């Protein structure tokens, strides 16, 4: 077993991990070690060849790979130590990372601080209860994206997409451009799950129909997918008898949601928020285990990569403060999700936090127009911001002074 030490270890080299490692280096946090299980840096952005990334950060539309490369170039020009093809197995007591790779075998890494940036994964067919056969041709949207964009392989000729998440919408357009016939996008909810701009640019512009309150109930095919059965659902999401439609296809693409990659977090004893399914964070982006921080989609599923990078930098600032001994005092105040707020990240405010304003991220429960974002402490309003349009798929970022307790609400304007 090879033993080593580092001041800051970052697990995952996607947009959150790259931003966190660079910010930790800029802050003079000491030795920074970046661990990535893939052979290349960049995470999921490697296979995102569509544009729309970096509008907030760079002021221009980049592809996902271009956005990642802007950070990778900085990492390669820095003294950050990078270990690719390295799988983290466990986070032990006293911030010890146990990992392995073919070069070094088992690694025992003693860390001053750890930043979790493992991202998220897609839900699969087994997690959405689709009945019937199990033929080839039932794939997640991310897998289809990798096949087409990185492997140069078309996984089918006629496709049905289940779920209106952003990656599914983007792949509807991508598959159409590659000659795959997309017969429709089917969404069990009564509203789309992806961003409005993706509905317009990826479906409407290509004449691809979106069927709301409809799901796939059955899959048929002995070896290769031959057809799926769709069915309309009621307000209780239960199938409505007599509304079934059989659709011939050889590819079913699943875009039914993302789940934070938190097996390491759970094993490390970190408290998990049942709403985000990621770690509960304080205003320094530190988890319930002192010295372990989290950022990006491992904390909550973000919609914009710019926000992911922003959260990575916030976690790095927290890690640097921890190494300086500034986060040792116990005690925190809650951040409460109030009217029409699904969740807020971070969920706690450190009582000794004197770092000025903190970035918060939230999602609403239902669509709201002409609404006010209101943050208050014991009835005293600290922030009031007018929002022209808010929808559940779109995350809202705001900054306010990190002093709690904090109640966050989205109040609909009276008509």
Image (cartoon, rainbow, N blue to C red):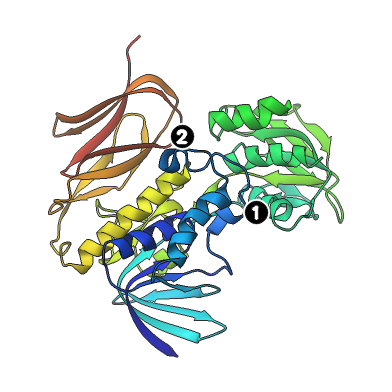
Q: Is residue 14 left or right of residue 289?
A: right
The residue identified by callout 1 is 126
The alpha-carbon separation of the residues under discs 1 and 2 comes to 27 Å
Residue found at x 32% / y 12%:
414
Viewport quadrant of the N terminus: bottom left
Give the residue furthest to the bottom. 1
Residue 193 image-quadrant placement: top right
Q: Is residue 411 left or right of residue 52?
A: left
Q: Is disc 1 placed on a helix, strand or loop? A: helix
The numbered mark, 1 or 2, whose residue comes first in the sequence reads: 1
Task: Give the number of the disc on residue 394.
Answer: 2
**Which element type, helix, strand or loop, lies under badge 2?**
loop
Outermost front residue = 77
Residue lying at the far top in this picture: please name it: 415
Instruction: Give the quarter of the figure containing the C terminus.
Output: top left
Q: Nearer the viewer, residue 92 or 115?
A: 115
Residue drawn at point x = 65 percent, y = 54 percent = 126
* Left or right of 127 on screen, residue 414: left
With respect to residue 219, does 387 lie above or below?
above
Pick the front one: 77 or 240: 77
């Amino acid at each position: 077993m090879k033993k080593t030490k580092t001041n800051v270890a970052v697990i995952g080299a996607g947009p959150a991990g790259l931003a966190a490692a660079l910010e930790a280096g800029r802050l003079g946090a000491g030795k920074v070690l970046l661990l990535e299980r893939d052979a290349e840096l960049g995470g999921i952005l490697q296979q995102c060849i569509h544009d729309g990334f970096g509008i907030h950060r760079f002021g221009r539309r980049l592809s996902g790979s271009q956005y990642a490369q802007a950070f990778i170039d900085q990492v390669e020009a820095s003294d950050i130590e990078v270990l690719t093809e390295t799988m983290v197995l466990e986070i032990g007591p006293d911030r010890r990372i146990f990992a392995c790779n073919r070069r070094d075998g088992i690694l025992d890494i003693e860390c001053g601080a750890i930043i979790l940036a493992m991202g998220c994964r897609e839900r699969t067919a087994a997690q959405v209860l689709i009945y019937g056969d199990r033929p080839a041709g039932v794939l997640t949207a991310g897998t289809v994206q990798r096949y087409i964009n990185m492997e140069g392989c078309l996984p089918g000729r006629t496709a049905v997409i289940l779920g209106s998440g952003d990656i599914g919408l983007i792949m509807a357009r991508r598959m159409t451009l590659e000659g795959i016939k997309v017969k429709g996008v089917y969404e069990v909810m009564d509203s789309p799950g992806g961003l409005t701009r993706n509905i317009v640019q990826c479906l409407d512009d290509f004449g691809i129909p979106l069927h709301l309150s409809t799901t796939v109930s059955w899959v048929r095919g002995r070896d290769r997918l031959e057809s799926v059965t769709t069915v309309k659902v009621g307000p209780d999401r239960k199938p409505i008898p007599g509304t079934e439609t059989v659709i011939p296809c050889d590819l079913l693409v699943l875009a039914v949601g993302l789940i934070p990659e938190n097996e390491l977090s759970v094993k490390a004893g970190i408290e998990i928020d049942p709403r985000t399914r990621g770690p509960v964070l304080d205003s320094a982006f530190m988890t319930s285990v002192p010295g372990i921080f989290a950022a990006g989609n491992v904390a909550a599923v973000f919609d914009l990569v710019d926000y992911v990078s922003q959260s990575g930098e916030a976690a790095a600032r927290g890690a640097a403060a921890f190494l300086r001994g500034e986060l040792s005092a116990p005690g925190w105040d809650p951040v409460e999700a109030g009217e029409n707020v699904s969740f807020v990240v971070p969920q706690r405010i450190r009582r000794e936090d004197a770092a000025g304003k903190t970035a918060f991220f939230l999602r609403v429960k239902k669509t709201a127009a002409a609404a006010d974002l209101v943050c208050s402490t014991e009835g005293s309003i600290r922030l009031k911001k007018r929002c022209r349009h808010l929808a559940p798929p779109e995350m809202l970022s705001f900054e306010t002074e990190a002093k709690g307790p904090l109640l966050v609400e989205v109040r609909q304007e009276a008509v």
